[in-house]
Amino acid sequence: MECFTSEYHKFIPCNLSQPVTESRVSHYSVRSCWIKLHANMDSVLYHSDVEPEWLDDVQKNGELFYLELSEGEEEAVLAQVTASQSAATNHVRFSEKEAEIITDEGRRRTNSSAKSEPKLKKLAKILGRKRQPSQRRGAGGKGSSPAAQQPPSILKNQTGQRACLMVQQSYQKDVCVYLNPKRLANVCLPPQEKGGLLEALLGVVHRGGDERGCVGERLVIHGLVPHSPASKCAQILIGDVLVAVDDVDVTSENIERVLSCIPGPTQVRLTLETASADVGTMDLAMPRPRPSPAVSQLVRLLWGEDTVELQMSVAHIPHIVMYLSLKLDSESPQEEEILYQYPLSEAATQLKSVRGIFLTLCDMLECVTGGQIVSSSLLLQKQLVHVGYWKEGSNLLVIGLPADRVPLLHLQTITEGVVHTLKVMYGSLDSSFCEVEHASRLDHFFCLFFQRFMQLSCLSDGSGPSPQDISRTLFLEGLPAVRWLTLPPDIKAGDLFKGYLIANHLPKQDLRDVCLYCQHYCLLSLPTEQRVGQLVVWREVFPQRCATPHPGYHEPHGRFFLLIVGLRHFMQCVLLEAGGCASPAIGSPGPDCIYVDQVKATLLQLESLDSAIEDRLSAPPMPSLSCADWFLPSGGRDRPEGIGSSPLLNRLTAAIKPPSPGAIGRSLFGEMGPGSGSAGLKGRKPSPQRSLSDSGSEGRGDLGGAFTPGLSPHTTPDATRRMPPVGSRRDSLGSGGSDGSGSSGGLFKVHVVLLQPNPFYLGSLKKSLSEREVEEMQNTLKLTAGAENTLFHYVMMESVQGIFIAPTHREISQLSGSIHPQLIRNFHHCCLSIRHAFQQSLSSRASRGLGPVREHGVLFQCKPENWTDHKKPAPTMTYWVIGRMLLEPVPQEFYVCFHDSVAEVPVEMAFRLSFGLAM
Amino acid sequence: MLPSETVQLLCLTASSGVPLFSRGSCKQLPFSVIGSLNGVHMFGAGQGALLSSCETERDSRVAWRVFQDSLMLIAVSGTAGASSELHLRRLLENAWNCMVLVLGQDELANVRNVERLKRELRSCYRLIDRLLERGGKDQGFMGDLTHCADCLLPSQPGILQETLDSFTRAADSEFGCLLVRGRLALATDKWWRLAPQEVVLLSALVNSLSGTTSCDYPVFLPQGSPTVAHRLLCFQLLPGVVACVLCGPSPSLQRAESELVGRFWSPVVEALRVCLEQAERSTLPPSVRLRWDVEALLIINRESRRAVAVCPHARGHTPSEVPPLSSPAHRWELLRAFYTFAVTRYFTSEEPVALPTSPPSATAERLHEEFSLGFTHLPVQCYLVTDDCKCYGLQTPQHQLFLLTDLSVPTFALRTVATHTLNAISTPTGF
C-alpha cells in the first residue's frame, strides 16, 4: 500500500489539469472525473509488479476495452449462462450418412462474427494441431482402457443406429464454465501428478492410473475441488467423463496442454459423458440460483460475445440504423447509397427496403416546408415504428425504433444522443460510418444501443424498481447530466460511484461527452449490478467542446484520449490531452501503464472513502421520502378487519382503537425483515445507545413483532411507536430517520425543526452514534410543507454543471411496496412528457402554440390493485408529478412527485432543494 | 415552399395517384411535390410499410391516410403552424367524412370515372374549406378537433325543447335540432345518438349553407348510413337561428316550410329572440357566473359528447394590472393548443362507447401512438404555466374541462378555480 500512496501524491497534479512531468511517459494534460461503482468488500487483486493483464487486449490503433469481473462474480455469471444454455435444446441435423448435433452454442459460434471470439479461435487452432497425435498415441498406448479410444462424439461413431439417437444424446452434455488462468498467475503451478491445471484451473480431480502414468486415459472425474469453477457450475458430477474442451478431444495426456492454451479469462465448453441417462430431468430438478440472465448478458455484450444470440432475441422487433448517402446516382450499382446498416434481421431488412421513403422525405420536406425532417411514423407488420433522422452534410442517419419502446416525444433526444456519442468517439459521423475498419465496432455499438431499448428487462440494473421501466432509462439518460451523489462537506473526493458521480474536474461539455460514452457502453449501470474486477478503457475521443468554435477564443489543437479505469467500486474517467500544452501524440498510442497505475492508485486511495460513501448511500433518504403505499390501505390483503376506506378514516379508526396485539402488524413486520420493525423498514440499525427516557416508547417498537397495535398497514412503524401520544400518524421514511426524536416526544416540534433550508447537510458522519442521532434529528429534512411528509420522488437537474440528483437506488428500494414502483415508473413516464414541453419551449420552434412553458404538472389517481371488497369503492390516492424549469439564477429543471394532500409551490421546493446543492 | 401557418389538403386516387383536388388557403403545391408525397406512401405500402406521418424540426407535418382503399388524403402543414399531429389526423378523418356526407360511400369507394368524381367533389369544397380554416377562428368552433358538438346552453330550454320535439314529429322524423349562431342549442334525443362526428359535420354543413332561408339537402351519414341518403331540411327561423330536421322522402320542403314552421315556431319567437341575444354574449346562460380571470374554457360532457366553449369578452373591470390576453382569436388558439396538448398526452379523446366503425378506422387506431397508454396510473388533472397564460385541464368520469386563465391567478389556486368553474357550469345547467 505504501507504493500506492507515493504514486498517489505524484498523481495529484494530474487532476489539476497540469501536464505530467515524468520523463518516461508521453505527456498529456489530464482532466478527470470519478465514478463510484459497486460496493463489495472483496480483496483486490492488484499486481503492480506484474505485467498488466489488459496489455494483450490493446488493439492496433491503441484502443482498449478490457473488462474483468471480480472473483466469485464471474463464476456466478457463467453458471447462469450455463444453466440457460443447457436448457436450450440441441438441434439434430441429418446429413447423408451422419447425424450431427448442433447445439445452440455451436451454432452461435459459427454464426458469430470473426471478431467476437478470437481467443477461442486461437485456442481451437492450437488444439486442433495437437489433436491428431494424441489420438494416435492413445490408440497405441499400453494399459489404456478401451474406453479411452472411444471418440468423444459417440454420435458420429454410431450413425447407423438412428433409432437410439436421442437416447444416446442424453448421455452427453455440454457444460460451459468460466476459466480465468490469470488468477493462477502468482500461484506456482502444481505439478502434473498433483492434478495440474485440471485441478487448479478447472477444479476437477482426476486420479489417473495409480502412478503408472497412463497416457491417453479417459478423464473420469474423481472429485471436485470446492469453490472451483467446476463445482460451482453444479453440472459436472463425479463419475462423469470429460471428453472434449471446446470440441477438442481431451484425454489425460493432452489435457494439461489444452488448458494451458487458454490465454485469458474466457468461457470454455466442456463436453462430458455422464452416467445418468436423464440429464434433462436432473437439470430441472437441480436447484438453480435465481437466474438473472441480465447480468451475464450485459457483461457478455460488453465482452463482445454472443451478439448474434442477443440479436436473434430482438429480431422480431423492427429496429434499424442506417447511414445513407443522399447523393443518389441512378447509374451506381444497387444499395450503394447504404454506407452502413445494422442489424440484418428480417424486420430490419424490411425497413431497409423502404429506405427510399426516408431519402425522399428528407429531400422533399426540405423543399416543401423549409425544415429538416426529424421523425416519421410508419406501420410495419402491424407495429408502429418511429424513425428518427439526422442529416449530416450529404448523408443521412436513420434510426428506427418501435413505438412501444420509445415514445415519439423522446425520439429526437435519442437521435441526438447517438449522434453526439458517435461524434465524441470518432470525430464526425462521416468518419465513423465511412471507414471500413470501424464497421465491426459500430456493430457492437449499435448492438448495445438497441439492447438498451429493446431488452431492458435484461440489461436494466437489478436494483431498479421495475425491470421494464423503460421510461426511467429514457428519461434519466436523456437528461444532459450525470447523476450526482451529494456528499457531506467533509468528504472532498470524488469518482463515479455505483453510477453516481462523486467529483468532477471536467468542464460541463466534456463531462457530458464522457457520460454519454459511459451510458452507451452501459458502464454506469454495469457496476450497479456486477462487481467489476478491473476495467480499463482507452480510446481517442473528440470532445465536442472543441468542435464548436468560441468567438475570441481558440482551443489549442490537440488530441484527446479517454482513459477509464474501474476497480471494484470506483471508476475514474480521465481525459488526456496531447498537443496543446502537452507534447503532441503521434500515431495511435495505446494506454500507458503508468497512467493506468496512477489512476488505479488513486482509486485505491478512494477505497478509504468507500465506507463513508456507503454510509451516505445507506443513510435515510435526504430529503426524506415517503412510500406511496403508506397513503393507501392495501386492498384486501392484510386487512382482515376492513378498516375504513379513506386514509383519513383509517387514521381515525386507528387512533380510536385500543392497542391490541394484531396480526396485521406482525405480518407487516414479518415482511419487512427480522429485528425491530422500525429498523427493518427504514434499513437503519436500532441504536443500542438510546437514552432511558426513550425506552418507554421505544420498547413498544422493538417488540413490534408481537405487540404492535392493530393498525392498518399503511402506517409506518414509526407512527406505531408514537401512537400513544400522537395517534397513528403517517410518517415519512426520512423524517423517520430522526427516530431518535421519539425521545423528544413532541412530534410537531420536531417537524418545525426539520424545516431547514439545506436538505443535504448530513451532519458529520464521523461523529459518534449518539451524537449523530441528535444531529440527524435536527437535520433530517422534509421538502414538502405541512406536518406530514408527502414527497415520493424527485429529480433535479442543474444544467450549468451538467449533473442531476435523484434518490439513490437504495433509497428507492427501501421504500418497498406494490404501488410505489408503479408510481416511480409513472413519474418517469410523465417526466418524459414534461421535459419535452420544456424542450419545445426552449427551442425556437414553439413560437406559436402554447408559448414557453415554465411549469407543468399532472395529477394522477391510483387505486390499489386487486381490490377485493366489492361493497366499498376502492380507495384512491392522488399525487402530483410536477416539473418546473428555472432559468434564473442558473438553469435548472426540477421534477417532483408528491401526495395530493398538501398544495405545494414547486418553485419553493425547487429552491429548497437547490440550496442544498453545495458544490 | 409552403407558407407558414397554412394547411394543404390533397386528395388523390389511391390506386393510380390521379390528383382529385387540393384545398388550402395558399397556392397549390407543385404537381411534382404532390406526386412524390403520394409516391412515397404508395412505395411504402407496396413494401408492407404504411407511412402515417412525419414531422420536421420547424413543426411542419405531413399526414397520410388511405380511405376504403380508394382515396388517399394527404395533409401538409407549413412551418411554425399551430397544427398538431392530432389536428391533421382529425382533418383527414373529417375531410373523408365530409365527402361521404355529400357524395355517399359508394361513389367514393368505387371510383369508375375519375373526371366525374372530380366534378362531384366540388360540392364538398365549401365544407372542406370550412374545416381547413379550423371552423372559423374567431368563433371558437372546436368540434372538428374535439369530435364533440359545439353547443350552446340556452337559459330557458324547456319550451323550446318541446317545440322542437313536436316540430320534428310533425315532419315525420325523430332527428331534429336547433342551431343558434352555428352552435347546437337544442336537439332531439335521437339527434344526440348520431355519431359525434356526424353531429359536428351536420352542424358545419348547416353553417356553410347559412344565408338561405330554407333548403333541402341530401346527406349520407358517414357512420349511420354511408350508402343511403337522407334529407336534411333546414329552415332559418331568425337570422342566426336555424331549425333542422333529418327525414325521409316526406314531407316536401314546401309543405314543411309553409305548414309546419309557422305553426310550431311562431308562438315561441320571443323565446328564440332571447336565446339569440344570449348567444351574442355567451354560450352559457346568464345565470352562470364565471370568475373574471377566466380567459377561455372548454367543457366537454364525455357521455353525450357535447362541448361548450366560452371565451368571455369585454370584462367589466379588471382589478389586476395583468394585461388580458389580446384577442379572442388568440385565446381560442391557445385553448385549442392546450386541448391538443392535454388530450394527446394525458386524457383520452376517444369516445367512451365504441362506435360501429368500418375496418379502415380500426387500423387507424394503431396509426398513431397513444402516449397516455404508458401511464400506470390514471391522469386526472394537469396544468401548464407558460409565459402568456395558465392552463388547467381536469377530467372526471363525466366531464372534461380545459381552462385558460391569465397570469394573475396563483398557480396553487388553479385547481380550485377549475373545480369551482366545473361545478358552476354543470350544476345549474345539468350539462
Image: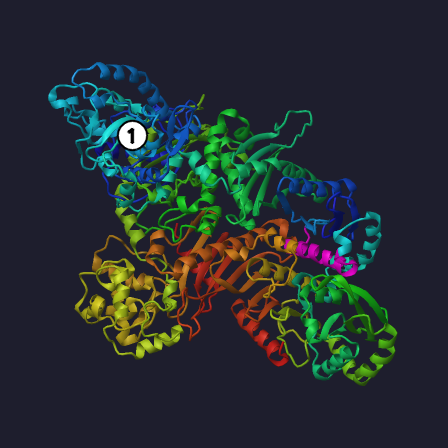
Q: Quadrant of residue B201?
A: bottom right
Question: Does the magenta portion include B101?
Answer: yes
Which residue is more in the foreground, A55 or B50?
B50
Q: Quadrant of the N terminus of chain A?
A: top left
As displayed, is residue B18 above or below residue A127?
below
- SS for dot 1: strand
**Which residue occupies the extreme bottom position in the image?**
B267
Give the total of numbered labels.
1
Question: Does the magenta portion include B370?
Answer: no
Which secondary structure class fits the magenta region best? Answer: helix
Query: Is B103 displayed left or right of A620 in the figure?
Result: right
User: Mark 1 is on which residue type?
Assistant: Thr
Position in image of residue A171 (x %, y %)? 28, 33
As displayed, is residue A418 above or below residue A192?
below
Which residue is more in the foreground, A623 or A135?
A135
Report if residue A562 is visible in the image.
yes
Q: Tell me, what colour scheme is on the image?
A: rainbow
As displayed, is residue A718 above or below residue B125?
below
Which residue is more in the foreground, A759 or A418?
A418
Which residue is more in the foreground, A578 or B429?
B429
* x 51%, y 33%: residue: A555
Q: Quadrant of residue A78?
A: top left
Q: Residues within 10 Å of mark 1 (few under 14, many from 20)?
A: many
Position in image of residue A198 (x %, y %)? 21, 27
Q: What range of the chain is rendered magenta?
A: B80-105
Chain of the residue displaying label 1: A
Position in image of residue B114 (x %, y %)? 81, 48
Query: Is A249 displayed left or right of A866 in the figure?
Result: left
Position in image of residue B366 (x %, y %)? 59, 52
Q: Which residue is mark 1?
A: A271
* x 44%, y 54%: residue: A796
